[in-house]
Amino acid sequence: MNEANQNRQDQLLHFGDFALNVVRRGLYRGQERVRLTAKPLETLIFLVENRGRVVEKQEILSAVWKGTFVTEDTLVHAIREIRRALGDDRDNPRFILTVPREGYRFVCEVLVESEPAPSSTDETTSIDDSPELAAPLPPKPAGIVDQPRTRSWVLPVFLGLLLLAPTIWIASKFVSRVGPQETAKPPNLDSQKLLTTTAFSEGKPALSLDGTLLLYISTNPDENEKTNDGKIKTFGDLFVKQLSSGNPVQITHKENPSGDIPVFTADNSFVVFSNYPRTDKARSLLNLYKVPAYGGRAYRSDDEPVPYITEASGAGFSPDEKWVAYTKHLQGRKALWLSPANNPEADHKEIADNGFTPRWSADGKWLAYTTSNPNGGPGDIWVVDGSSFTGARNLTNEPQQIYGLTWTPDNRFLVFSSKRMGPSLLWRVPFEGGPAQPLTGSAGDFSTPSMSGKGNMLVFSYYRGAQNLFIAEGLNAQARDLTKDEYHEFVRLSPSGEYVATVRQKPGYGEHLYVTDLRGNPTCLSDHASRHPSWSSAKKVSYLQTDQSGQQTHVIQVNIENLEKPVAQPVTMFPGKADWLDIDPADATKLVVVLSVNGKQEIVLRDLERKQPDVVIAEGLEYASLRWSADGSTLAWSGPEEAGPESTGIWVIKLGVDTKPRLIVPNGFGPVWRADNSVIYFGRLGAQSGLFEFDMKTNKEKLIRDWEQTDSFDVIGQRLVYSELGSTGKSRVYSLTLE
């Protein structure tokens, strides 16, 4: 044991019946250590240390998953595990309050204590990686003054390098044929190029206006510091790379930029980024800072970032160097402001009451922005006149989470990242109006696109994870893995339980429908983007496919009587975008979907024989995971977790009887009916995650089995199948040439 470890003091943060040892990275209840996996534990520590304020989602992701650009779903899983460990209730929280579309706030009182260093003869208490050997905590003291501190970050641990060759193709190359027997076109591998590769993740890229420089955030292994307890503290910093030379240089020093995407000024002389002030221990609001870019010259000691705009984030500069647009953090709102670039604090004009990620067209005639907060929250893409800053026009009219916005050099399209179909993909929407079209179609998440005003190079960050299939022969039985380092979603068992239908994200082939037998043998049933499968019989499975224009969604049915030659045919079509298909198990001529109409969602019932017109079952809120009861009399669904209390939870409506839906479980998701219609299985959103059942007669619920990080599951009889988050990779910056 080294001297530093012998002399250290362990800081203990007490709240409720718990205590956090922030040096040993452990959570305790009395003398017992409470088990939390690494990232949820780091998330809890971060929330406790930033107690008393709303911590935005992107801030948590940037801090805990530093340099690894995971989706918000990863954070949701971590919060679930924390609540489960603490016994917290999402709807009546003692510890962690969810602020819809914003983030989380730790609301419990915290007392701070420093525990004396352990004796040099008691070496077992210094073994941080052995929870069983960790020293017990002293009793909770009384009357200790609350003292905030700055915490050390733990080096992220990555499980395998999965980014060997992400595959991308342009929307115009997509295969539009219906039929599983055809082979998808291979992607154009020559059109993409890996721009960064280090021992760490890189992301949030931005190109200079002239297209000569690449800016991105990464960690520098040379800047690592070893803490007194032997752990590694890492620092995220800004790097600039001359695209012609390919040699990245670091332009900030242990800065850890946070918030929105950093950008170049119009003349490439400075880089502007958002971060929290170092002197502000509460870290309440982001500020904008700027640091010299010097065309990629390395960092110098006199290059300390200087404040640019207080309480602001998300800057964008006009090509003529006159204006800067940015998000101004005001009381209760985040407005889009415009100021002179050379003196932004002197004057301003408010462009929108709510606006983020402002970006000028290459000719400076138009300013685009989004009403989607990059830290979490749906919104649209808008454009205004670049001289009068009036006449705002909505280009998307379909609220969604957006992260990253850029113009093509010809000013004809805006490219953005959003989760319109599950993972975060890159899309483009015409400036003159029209539906959005996908630019990428592969496994993983694409985000933060950027293009220069000259040339046709698009840069973006790409991250790929895994979500494997597990199966259990008995709701409480041990599960076995059917897949390895694959990404499956929308899990549905066939009526016989013989096959599992999923949408699999596969590199090079996008999102396609697969059926997997109980031995783990997969068969691809589609060669085009697919989602939300539903079985109409033991050998017929249907799915949704939206055309490239986004104006029509087709229901495609596949007959798998002969798996070597499955037969696909269209069944029906819905205008616009439809999601969450479910076919009535008692009457295969009836189905339901969720439609997006004029920016709002509605559940629509359709009779395929057209004996009656479409029926709107519910409308105006947010809907997911539609499921019929076995007799077709009742429909259940759940709302997205972050949609707010009016939508979340398990809802049911008995058709022809109930006049409006009924909420039965406030914090559940993914309802699945038992065959006798007496029970609904569901997953828990709150403190105790796992598989639960709700008795429809007694209105009582009970826990069946524990699980972690599970988004999708299905039950047939006693057979349970579910997808679970697997190993993660590293985020990289890639380029794509748009023709």
Image (tube, helix red, strand yellow):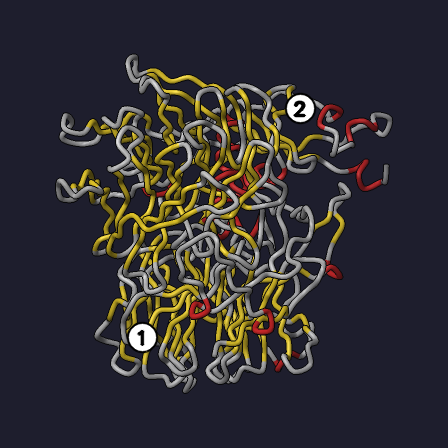
Q: Which residue sits at x=36%, y=41%?
A: 640
What x and y, as percent, mark residue 561?
A: 45, 38
Is 113 positioned to the left or the right of 383 in the image? right
Q: Is the Cβ of the residue at disc 2 closer than 8 Å to that at disc 1?
A: no
Work out whether residue 178 or residue 549 is closer to the camera in this orientation and state it: 178
The amino acid beneath tag 1 is Phe
Mark 2 neighbour density, 10 Å: few (under 14) some (14–19) many (20 or more): some
Q: Which residue sits at x=34%, y=54%?
A: 378
Nearer the N terminus, badge 2 or badge 1? 2
Residue designated by label 2? 137
Does residue 45 appear in this view? no
Report, in whole angstroms, how far the alpha carbon at label 2 lies from the one at label 1.
61 Å
| Quarter of the view holding residue 357 | bottom left
Work out whether residue 107 or residue 560 is closer to the camera in this orientation and state it: 560
Image height check: is 149 above or below 519? below
Image height check: is 265 above or below 182? below
What label sits on residue 236 in the rendered view? Answer: none
The amino acid beneath tag 2 is Leu
Is 691 positioned to the left or the right of 613 in the image? right
Image height check: is 563 above or below 218? above
- Quarter of the image for the N terminus: give it: top right
What x and y, as percent, mark residue 411?
A: 37, 80
- Label tally: 2
Mark 1 neighbour density, 10 Å: few (under 14) some (14–19) many (20 or more): many
What x and y, as percent, mark residue 58?
A: 48, 52
Is 189 positioned to the left or the right of 406 in the image? right
| Quarter of the view holding residue 279 | bottom right
Residue designated by label 1? 431
